[in-house]
Image (tube, rainbow, N blue to C red):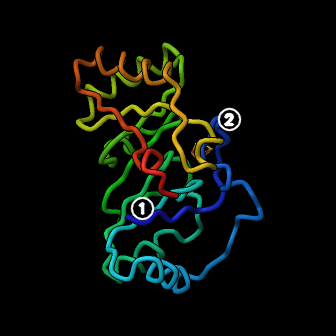
Amino acid sequence: MLFIRFHGCPLACPWCDEPLHRDPAARREMLAEQLLQAVRRLHPRLPYLLLTGGEPLAVPRLAELVDFFKQQGFWQAMETSGVGGPIPEGVDWLTLSPKTKLAEAIYQRANEVKYVIGPSPSPRLRAEILQRAELHPNVWVQPRSGAEGNRQGQAIINPQAVAACLQLIDEAAGTIRLSLQLHKWLNLP
Ligand code: SF4
């Protein structure tokens, strides 16, 4: 799967692990055709894309871009905080990673809900995750890694964040799953 990282995000999580999405020097404007050519250059036959960021929902005319890639035969996943415009219909797999209060409808649309967990999640967040695990069949927790870890292409694992994840999984009797950002462990960009 090839990641398309969009520049910019309406939120400003202090622990964001993708600092380049705020760096003006990292921003490149591309037409859809140019983006397609860049994807083909990297992987001539790869059929899987992940639209992420930054925040893909904040991209103007996102639905047109999704339709464009769909016409080219791509299967498209999207990872979003849920803040921005509507979810394009053509998205095949939606990972919702909530950072703020969201409408219930977007949880219903999501194929999976992923919570990023620091060393000491608040009681409110813990309660929300446990409740969500009762409502949604596919809930994940992921220990937070620092921005520095992402720049180096490596996971910097915080053992306390891992422990907080495992405790939630235990409390939910295994109905929550653990996500470990394997691309960082495998040192993929
Ligand atoms: S929502 Fe995601 S991309 Fe946006 S600031 Fe938070 S962690 Fe970073």
- Left or right: residue 136 versus residue 27 is left
Circle 1: element type: strand
Image quarter for ligand 1 equals top right
Dot placed on the residue nearer the N-terminal end, 2 or 1: 2
> Can you say whether 155 is above or below 51 in the image?
above
Determine the CA span between mark 2 and mark 1. 23 Å
What residue appears at the point 42 percent right and 18 percent down from the top-left corner? Answer: 163
Pick whichever, 147 or 75, lies toward us. 147
Q: Kindly indicate the quadrant of the structure image that contains residue 77.
A: bottom left
Task: Check disc 2 and report the residue beneath it.
Answer: 14
Question: Are the residues at dot 2 and dot 1 in contact (C-beta closer than 8 Å)?
Answer: no
What residue appears at the point 36 percent right and 66 percent down from the top-left corner? Answer: 76
Q: Is mark 1 within 8 Å of ligand 1?
A: no
Q: Position of residue 158 (x, y in %)?
A: 53, 26
- Left or right: residue 1 versus residue 22 is left
Type of amino acid under label 2: Pro
Q: Position of residue 54 (x, y in %)?
A: 59, 54
**Circle 1 Cα neighbour tier, 10 Å, few/some/many (<14 / 14–19 / ≥20):** some
Q: Looking at the rendering, in which quadrant would you find the N terminus?
A: bottom left
> Can you say whether 135 is above or below 19 in the image?
above
Q: How many marks?
A: 2
What residue appears at the point 34 percent right and 75 percent down from the top-left corner? Answer: 46
Type of amino acid under label 1: Leu
Circle 2: element type: loop
Pick whichever, 19 or 70, lies toward us. 19
**Circle 2 Cα neighbour tier, 10 Å, few/some/many (<14 / 14–19 / ≥20):** few
Label number found at residue 26 = none
Q: Position of residue 39 (x, y in %)?
A: 47, 77
> Can you say whether 71 is above or below 79 in the image?
below
What residue appears at the point 42 percent right and 80 percent down from the top-left corner? Answer: 68
Q: Position of residue 123 (x, y in %)?
A: 49, 13
Label number found at residue 50 = 1
